[in-house]
Image (cartoon, coloured by chain):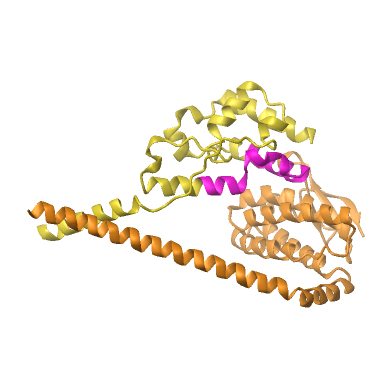
Chain colours: A orange, B yellow
């Protein structure tokens, strides 16, 4: 008799758990549909967005300049061997990359930029989550992406493409200063590398 | 005191039974899309087999589930890894990537295998045949490097 009671108890509680869990799922679904809803609202206010981005474009490609700024801050954090700072700046860069306005470019360039941004965002996100060795590996490809972006968007300030032959079979990066400070080795080999190209 | 332990044991049992009913997503599909890595690249047979065994369970739309796959909380553990793996790289959808993205992914594949981070230890613990021997590591890295340089 006691055993029977116990079994009934277990079944009852199991049933309650299941009900509770399915309730939670239903709630989740509601939440996601709410999320979609607000996103749709966001889309509706697109007119407002356009105005904003046009203003930025008139300021001489403000968005790509913001990306470059964040990229240089990230580079400096890696030069300083600062893993935590680089993590935060990776997240910042991922955001500013996402804000790049491609609407004023030709279709071919638009596609190129989107491709570059998608790749760069992924590397920035990895940088925001990993140890410094990983960050530097991802920074290599990120640098290539940003360099390719600059080839399309141009830059308002003079840039130096620098190159370290030692890191990972040779790796490049961009800098605002002619003087070499190495983001791939940091304090271990701060001066390794040379300027290989000037970008105006 | 004895009673308390008994109650705790019963609650634990009930929770364990309860979570078995939580619905989960299964990662299974019979369709191999035309964008699949093996279909668009000329992959040597031995490497094909290795990729299938070592990578495809988490990096494609089809998982060969282990026997305990329907037992919670293992299902959650597996589900999490599969979701994360597919978000990072889905070999079934390889050809939908641009050349830039492919190069990026191939480089990451090389780095992950070289450093021994992939396949995951928790995976090779169960799937002994998924481990890469030194030779296999070299073979696969050579192949992936060639593929990357050909893009």
Q: Which residue, as the protein is rendered here, is positioned at the far top?
A: B45
Q: Which residues are magenta?
A: B82-110
Q: How many marks?
A: 0
Q: Which residue, as the protein is rendered here, is positioned at the far right?
A: A200
Q: Can you give x and y, in whole percent of width and height, for residue B101 in the image?
A: 73, 45
Asked if residue B100 lies in the magenta stretch, the reply is yes
Asked if residue A58 lies in the magenta stretch, the reply is no
| Residue A180 at least partly seen | no
| Residue A104 at least partly seen | yes
Q: Nearer the viewer, residue A1 or A140?
A: A1
Question: Looking at the magenta stretch, what is its main secondary structure?
Answer: helix
Residue drawn at x 63%, y 38% as measured from the top left: B91
Q: Can you give x and y, in whole percent of width and height, for residue B25 in the image?
A: 48, 49
Quadrant assignment, res A86? bottom right
Q: Nearer the viewer, residue A82 or A43?
A: A43
Residue drawn at x 49%, y 35% as measured from the top left: B64
Left or right: B112 in relation to A7: right
Image quarter in which the C terminus of chain A is found: bottom right
Q: Which residue, as the protein is rendered here, is positioned at the far left?
A: A1
Q: Is residue A186 above or below residue A97?
A: above
Q: Can you give x and y, in whole percent of width and height, for residue A172 in the image?
A: 79, 48
Q: Nearer the viewer, residue B133 or B144?
A: B144
Q: Can you give x and y, in whole percent of width and height, for residue A102 in the image?
A: 83, 62
Q: Is residue B65 above or below residue B81?
A: above
Quadrant assignment, res A107? bottom right
Quadrant assignment, res A91? bottom right
């Amino acid at each position: 008799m006691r055993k029977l009671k116990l079994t009934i108890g277990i079944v009852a509680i199991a049933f309650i758990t299941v009900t509770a869990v399915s309730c939670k799922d239903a709630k989740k679904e509601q939440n996601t549909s709410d999320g979609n809803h607000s996103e749709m609202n966001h889309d509706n206010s697109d007119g407002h967005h356009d105005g904003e981005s046009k203003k930025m474009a008139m300021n001489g490609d403000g968005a790509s300049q913001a990306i470059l700024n964040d990229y240089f801050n990230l580079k400096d954090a890696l030069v300083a061997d600062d893993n935590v700072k680089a993590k935060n700046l990776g997240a910042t860069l991922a955001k500013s990359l996402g804000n790049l306005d491609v609407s004023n470019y030709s279709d071919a360039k638009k596609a190129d930029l989107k491709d570059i941004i998608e790749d760069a965002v992924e590397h920035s996100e990895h940088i925001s989550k990993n140890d410094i060795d990983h960050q530097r590996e991802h920074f290599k490809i990120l640098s290539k992406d940003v360099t390719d972006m600059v080839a399309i968007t141009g830059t308002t300030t003079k840039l130096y493409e620098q190159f370290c032959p030692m890191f990972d079979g040779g790796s490049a990066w961009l800098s605002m200063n002619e003087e070499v400070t190495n983001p791939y080795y940091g304090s271990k080999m701060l001066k390794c590398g040379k300027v290989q190209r000037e970008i105006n | 005191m004895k009673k308390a332990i008994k109650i705790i044991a019963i609650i634990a049992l009930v929770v364990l039974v309860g979570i078995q009913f939580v619905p989960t997503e299964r990662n299974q599909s019979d369709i191999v899309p035309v964008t699949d890595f093996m279909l668009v690249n000329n992959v040597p047979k031995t490497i094909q087999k290795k990729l299938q065994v070592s990578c495809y369970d988490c990096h494609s739309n089809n998982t060969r589930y282990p026997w305990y796959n329907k037992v919670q909380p293992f299902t959650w553990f597996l589900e999490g890894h599969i979701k994360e793996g597919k978000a990072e790289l889905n070999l079934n959808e390889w050809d939908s990537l641009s050349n830039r993205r492919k190069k990026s992914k191939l480089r990451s594949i090389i780095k992950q295998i070289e450093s021994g981070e992939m396949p995951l230890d928790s995976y090779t613990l169960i799937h002994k045949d998924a481990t890469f021997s030194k030779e296999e590591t070299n073979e696969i890295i050579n192949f992936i490097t060639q593929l990357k340089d050909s893009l």
